[in-house]
Image (tube, rainbow, N blue to C red):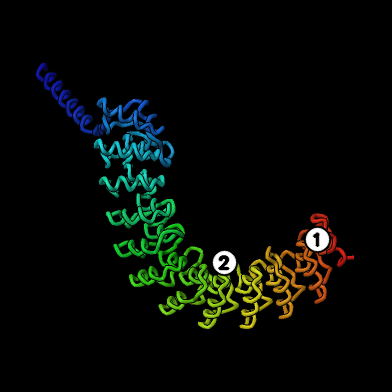
């Protein structure tokens, strides 16, 4: 019996030992955070204040040029997650953040590590670019800074920050030193190439360099479904457009809002039609759902409008999102020449948008309201008594906007004073309110 008891006790001890071992094995490995020497607050303040003499004294007395300090946080973390981006900054990073160029030069001369990173991997160069300190960034590059160290939580890297701040020279240097050309930001949805094209000030030479060195031209902004071809057309960068199309871009791809490359080219600030000609030669559709002709009217380029109509653009095609036609755009912008050309080429003066508004009514809502455009529409057959979805009329709107000349024109062409809108108001009530608001009672003579 004693033998059995001893054997049972031995078995129990073995089981206990095995369980204990398993518990030990199951323990997660301990990750030891690298410990840095943190400098005194006095030297941190000296850097912040730009006191080079104090910084020199610190180093001369044996201070470590690579000592660490507490910096500043960048961005935010998920709820409950600690933001440690202010930890383990080097003195050089601190000087960079405060843009103390002379202190930066001195620390580098004393062998400060230009490629050291803080607790989240940000380098001095990244901080220089992210804070628009171009001269400091160029200094760091001259001293061997790694262009691909550091990025924000969103993925935004040094090059994207330089592009966002329109720093052409710095961007070119970063590109030539091997910056990642295919990084993209989850905040904006833009890749490096999209960032370069998004800016109004980044030069075409920078854009071409990015494309030539292998940036993906087919990347689509996941937030807005915009492409590099669209943005290149918006900037009228013909060289980039040709390079992008040559690399396989779809000329008829539509953004989330229904925009196309042709629409962007039609709507940009450039008045000539050469880019439109190139895109159509490459297969761009002139009657896509967002109506490039409307964009051309918006750009105030009659040359573009004429060309698109020659290529088969439908002058009465309405935009899918709101039902506006090209004539709506011309009327709202009080562009007489454009409106006349569209009407001469078949534009319907009584077409409605999806809100049940007529061209005449919408033309009256423009702050640039033009008597000449209103008269043109009426002369060409616009219905002066058209009633909108909210029961309002052109006469009501003219009275509300205190436009006595337009009121007279409408009445002379048969506009009726009767009628009550959705708000229970008549044209006369709007005229009274307008007179009280402006102090100008001229308009009331039409409603005696």
Residue most extreme to the top: 2
Give the Cα distance between marks 1 and 2: 31 Å
Label number found at residue 155:
none
Q: Secondary structure at mark 2?
A: loop
Tell which of 368 and 287 is nearer to you.
368
Mark 2 Cα-neighbour bin, 10 Å: few <14, some 14–19, many ≥20 = few
State the image coordinates of residue 180 (x, y, percent, origin top left): 30, 54
Q: Secondary structure at mark 1?
A: helix
State the image coordinates of residue 239 (x, y, percent, origin top left): 38, 70
User: Where, quadrant-wise, is the C terminus in this rendering?
Assistant: bottom right
Taking the spot 86% from the left edge, 63% from the top edge, the residue there is 444
Taking the spot 44% from the left edge, 62% from the top edge, the residue there is 225
Front tag of 1 and 2:
1
Residue most extreme to the left: 3
Q: Please indicate whether residue 89 sits to the left or right of residue 32 in the image.
A: right
Label number found at residue 430:
1
Tell which of 81 and 75 is nearer to you.
75
User: Where, quadrant-wise, is the N terminus in this rendering?
Assistant: top left
Tell which of 272 and 305 is nearer to you.
272
Is 283 drawn above or below residue 237 in the view shown? below
Q: Quadrant of residue 20?
A: top left
Q: Which residue is mark 2?
A: 321
Q: Quadrant of residue 206?
A: bottom left
């Amino acid at each position: 019996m004693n033998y059995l008891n001893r054997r049972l006790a031995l078995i129990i001890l073995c089981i206990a030992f095995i369980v204990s071992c398993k518990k030990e094995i199951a323990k997660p490995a301990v990750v030891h955070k690298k410990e840095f020497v943190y400098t005194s607050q006095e030297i941190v303040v000296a850097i912040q204040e730009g006191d080079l003499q104090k910084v020199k004294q610190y180093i001369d007395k044996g201070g470590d040029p690579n000592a660490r300090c507490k910096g500043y946080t960048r961005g935010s973390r998920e709820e409950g997650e600690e933001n440690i981006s202010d930890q383990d900054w080097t003195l050089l990073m601190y000087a960079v953040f405060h843009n103390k160029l002379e202190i930066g030069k001195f620390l580098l001369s004393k062998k400060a590590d230009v490629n050291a990173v803080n607790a989240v991997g940000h380098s001095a160069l990244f901080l220089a670019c992210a804070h628009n300190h171009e001269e400091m960034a160029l200094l760091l590059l001259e001293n061997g800074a790694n262009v691909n160290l550091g990025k924000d939580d969103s993925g935004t890297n040094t090059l994207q920050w330089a592009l966002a701040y329109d720093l052409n020279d710095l961007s070119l240097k970063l590109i030539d030193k091997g910056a990642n050309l295919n990084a993209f930001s989850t905040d904006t949805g833009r890749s490096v190439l999209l960032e370069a094209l998004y800016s109004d000030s980044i030069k075409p030479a920078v854009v071409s360099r990015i494309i030539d060195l292998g940036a993906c031209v087919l990347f689509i902004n996941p937030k807005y479904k915009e492409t590099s071809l669209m943005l290149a057309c918006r900037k009228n960068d013909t060289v980039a457009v040709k390079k992008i199309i040559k690399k396989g871009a779809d000329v008829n791809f539509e953004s989330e809002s229904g925009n196309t490359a042709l629409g962007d080219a039609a709507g940009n600030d450039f008045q000539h039609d050469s880019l439109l000609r190139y895109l159509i030669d490459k297969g761009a559709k002139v009657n896509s759902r967002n109506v490039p002709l409307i964009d051309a009217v918006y750009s105030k380029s009659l040359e573009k409008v004429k060309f698109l109509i020659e290529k088969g653009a439908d002058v009465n095609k309405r935009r899918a999102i709101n039902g506006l036609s090209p004539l709506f755009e011309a009327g709202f912008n009080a562009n007489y020449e454009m409106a006349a050309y569209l009407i001469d080429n078949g534009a319907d003066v009584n077409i409605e948008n999806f809100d049940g508004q007529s061209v005449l009514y919408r033309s009256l809502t423009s702050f640039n309201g033009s008597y000449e455009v209103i008269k043109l529409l009426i002369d060409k057959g616009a219905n002066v008594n058209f009633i909108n979805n909210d029961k309002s009329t052109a006469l009501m709107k003219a009275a509300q906007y205190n436009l006595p000349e337009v009121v007279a024109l409408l009445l002379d062409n048969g506009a009726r004073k009767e009628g009550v809108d959705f708000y229970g108001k008549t044209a006369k009530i709007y005229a009274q309110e307008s007179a009280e608001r402006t102090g100008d009672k001229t308009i009331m003579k039409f409603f005696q």
